[in-house]
Image: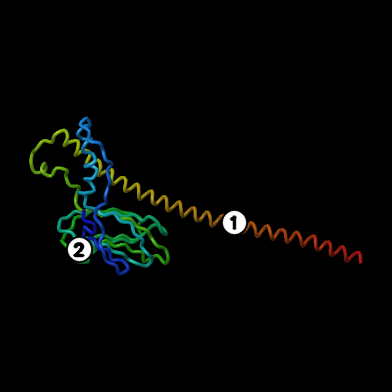
Amino acid sequence: MKLGCQRRLAVHAAGIQGCLPARRLIFAPTLWLSPRLPPAIMFLPLLMLLPSVLANYTDLTFELPDKEIQCFHEEMQKDDKFTFAFQVISGGHYDVDCFIEDPTRRQIYRKHKIQHDSISEKAEISGIYSFCFGNQFSTFTHKKVYFHLELGDVPPLFPNTETKDVALTQLESSCVSIYYALNIVIKLQTQQRVQASIDRLHAEDISTHVIYWASGETLILFLVTVGQVIILKRFFTDKRANASVATT
């Protein structure tokens, strides 16, 4: 397997240009292929790899500094369908600016101070499309953003059956059902991981605030206690001083 960049997705951030891997690797457990196993179970490890191999999508989580714009570029052909979704995971009020530009620099999508959104469009012209996120309105807060870019529809498991009137066998029908179910599972797991990351970062933020608040309360309680002791000590000192003056 050739490692490295497999898609023309360029990242322009802080003067750095590179490309990102297009597919995630999913490792399937090894099954003992016994003749007694049903055919659908025998092909299950292969089917678990198919969505990641055939799907043409990118998942990326990145940090967006304050007062900056980061853009990601993808080359598309005319009439290519794409689905773009993003969500702010942490930082400030969980909002960013987002806009999409076509090869002519025309904005086909723009939202201001938004937490999450999803859009499905078709490329009107061929060229490089830009997917940009902005955090110019923030003075010191960094944002962590997750986005998902998917090109085209889910490819069929058996392409020959799309053009020919061929009836699927029971094994093929089972494989197709498992194939589309695994695609749905992948999307649900991705959403769950994003939500879990948001909840974890939110819990860590609350824990930090609780620690600071508890430390402040402890310090204030200590100062109040010391102050009360000093004040009470002065009361008894003044009485003793007055009693000694009266006796003399």
**Residue 25 rendering spot, x and y as whole percentages:** 26, 50
**For residue 149, side relative to residue 157 (left or right):** right
In the image, what residue type sits under mark 2?
A: Ile
**Residue 23 rendering spot, x and y as whole percentages:** 24, 53
Q: State the image quarter where residue 175 is shown.
A: top left
Q: Nearer the viewer, residue 185 or 22?
A: 22
Q: Above or below — where is 141 with respect to 39?
A: below
**What crowding class fits label 1: few (fewer than 14 Cα within 10 Å), some (14-19), or many (20 or more)?**
few
Q: Above or below — where is 36 with respect to 48?
A: above
Measured Cα–Cα span from mark 2 to mark 1 = 56 Å
Q: Earlier in the sequence, mark 2 or mark 1?
A: 2
Label 1 SS = helix
Mark seen at residue 55 = none
Label 2 sits on residue = 128
- Quarter of the picture holding the C terminus: bottom right
The residue shown at (37%, 55%) is 89
Contact flag, marks 2 and 1 (Cβ < 8 Å)? no
**Residue 171 rendering spot, x and y as whole percentages:** 17, 34
**For residue 202, side relative to residue 160 (left or right):** right
The residue shown at (12%, 44%) is 159
Label 1 sits on residue = 217
Report the residue that reaches farthest toward the bottom. 15
Q: Above or below — where is 241 with respect to 204?
A: below
The residue shown at (36%, 66%) is 136
